Amino acid sequence: MIFMYNNTMNEEYFNIAGFTKYPTNIFYLEPENGYSQWLRECRIPDALAYYGLDYDTQFMKLFNPVYQSVLKSCKLQAVVYNISNYLFDSSLSPLWNKFERNVVDMLPAVIILCGWQRHIENMGKKKFDTTQIEFNKQEMRNTLTKGMRVYGKSGMLMSGMIWASILLNANLVKLGCLQYEMKKANNQYVCDKISVGDMVVAIHIPNRALFTPDAVEKSITMAKKYFGDKVSFICNSWLLGEQLGNYIKDDSNIFNFRQYFSIIQTEDSESIYNFLFNNADDNPNISDLSEETSLQKSVKKAMLSGVCFYDAIGILKF
């Protein structure tokens, strides 16, 4: 496909799509055959079937009205097309903090689903076996439905597009109980063993994973065999935060996991709200946070007394 520069677009396109913040150079391409033809070639109905979403009644009820709006609006198609190109470029992933929207709907899902054929192509290039392909499909399905399923939202959060970008570029595999992402190190990972631009493997902990000491050890052993022992493994998580250490038991799975890492940096983040309390609201009311587990109760009590919890970045010791 031949891409052409288009100088006629302006902030009106983003405004009608609900964006309040975005890179100033995002609009620069137009497909040779026009946006409508490109969208038809994306075969969104096939994408829904591929990820097993076509029979998800709740998802489709939220998705269809937004998708129909895109089909009828050239301006929305332009937004979908150009952000899709941005999303598919793995080198731009660190720039996703430049995007913000003031609405929650299924437009991000439309953008992501436009890349399903690219997802298949990238998994093929990296020679993913059936197990990894099925994991990627399931993980994409989870990503597209997490807003409504976990956070009770009427659509998909913009933050889900960061994770979708990792999947579309086939940079994520599951080995045992943990997930692993191959990526280039940026400034936040620099230490005596890592320089900017080095390839590193980021460890991710899925929600409700089998997180026992034996399962973690088995997964890390598998990962070292899969990626080789010359690459550095890092983890950026609320689980590694220094403050959390005061509220976990010495025989807990979290305590065991923390022992694998040497902390290289602390980060100000609100991810503990998302991952511990399943709350995606901006500046949530601490008094309203869940208290279903002992850890939720103790952390919430600490927050109410003024304790702040931060993420930490650790490098694998062993």
Image (cartoon, helix red, strand yellow):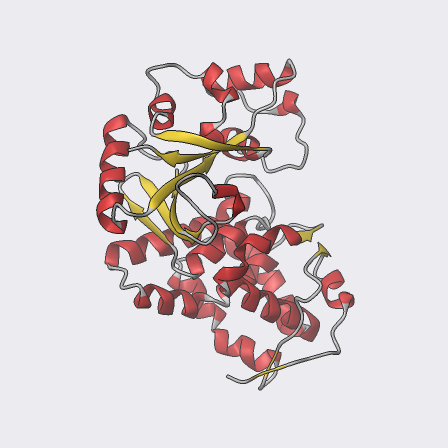
| Looking at the image, residue 242 lies above or below residue 158 | above
Q: Is residue 156 left or right of residue 263?
A: right
The residue positioned 41% from the left and 36% from the top of the image is 207
The residue positioned 37% from the left and 56% from the top of the image is 137
* Residue at the limit of the structure toward the front, as seen here: 192
Relative image position of residue 3 (x, y in whole percent)? 57, 82
Q: How many marks overall?
A: 0
| Looking at the image, residue 76 lies above or below residue 95 | below
Relative image position of residue 245 (x, y in whole percent)? 46, 19
Quadrant location, the C terminus? top left
Q: Which image quadrant for residue 148?
A: top right
For the residue pair 226 and 200, the one nearer the viewer reads as 200
Relative image position of residue 107 (x, y in whole percent)? 61, 59
For the residue pair 38 and 170, the one nearer the viewer reads as 170
Q: Is residue 54 visible?
A: no
Q: Is residue 120 left or right of residue 145?
A: left
The residue positioned 68% from the left and 67% from the top of the image is 25
The residue positioned 23% from the left and 29% from the top of the image is 214
Q: Is residue 183 visible?
A: yes
For the residue pair 152 and 143, the one nearer the viewer reads as 143
| Looking at the image, residue 126 lies above or below residue 211 | below
Q: Is residue 56 left or right of residue 289?
A: left
Relative image position of residue 100 (x, y in whole percent)? 67, 51
